[in-house]
Amino acid sequence: MLNRKKLNEEKKELGRHKKIFMPMRLQPPHKCHIELICDACRIADEITILLFNSDIIDIRNPFTGDEREEMLKYSLDIEKISNYRIVKMPYFEDNKDRFDFVFDNNLIDDDTVVLSGDAFVINAFSEIGYKVLVPTDVMSSFCPDVSGSRLREMIAQGNEQWKEHAAIGTITFYEKFNMRERIKRVCGY
């Protein structure tokens, strides 16, 4: 399990939320993703994790939605987190189609807070009246700046330090998903 510090006074003031909506790619899941989801689950009754681009494989998305879901669930099970659901969203070229998917599938409502570090998501949901939190609002400890892109690069290059940053589910399914070879082939490393 991740080593956690107590929430500081500023974060305690956030209070409890009924629902948190977290749009994410998780290509692949890393420790900061897991810590963020775990901390969000501790301050909300229900978390909805939206996995973007669940139906495509390309340079930025080398893992399928099912594979990412499997890695994520494994990692969250280890953390004993259960108050979440995962929804996979196919790739949409148009932002309107993305929003239609979210609203047509009732993924958010008036009781939902959006949690994201993505500037587009933050601005888009703020503009239509949703309360938006950023990762530093909810995380109980510092998380090193490691992106999925950097993690994929380290895996492709055979840099064993990737294991220090990867979620346990990513490490566990490394062989099953033939990660190094797939990332090298799909992402062009």
Image (cartoon, rainbow, N blue to C red):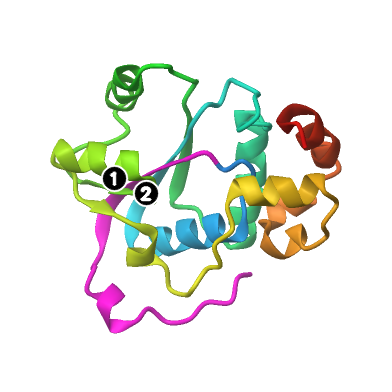
Q: Read off the residue under disc 1.
A: 122
Numbered disc 2: secondary structure: loop
Figure check: 9 above or below 113: below
Q: Residues within 10 Å of mark 1 (few under 14, many from 20)?
A: some
Q: Is residue 165 or residue 2 the one in the foreground?
A: 165
Q: Amino acid at mark 1?
A: Ile
Numbered disc 1: secondary structure: helix
Q: Read off the residue under disc 2.
A: 116
The answer to whether any part of residue 173 appears in the image is: no
Instruction: Say whether disc 2 or disc 1 marks the residue closer to the N-terminus.
Output: 2
Write down the region rendered in magenta.
Answer: 1-25
Q: Residue furthest front?
A: 189
The percent position of residue 183, horizontal first and vertical second, equals 76, 36
Q: Magenta stretch: residue 36 in it?
A: no
Figure check: 41 above or below 65: below
The answer to whether any part of residue 35 appears in the image is: yes
Figure check: 104 above or below 150: above
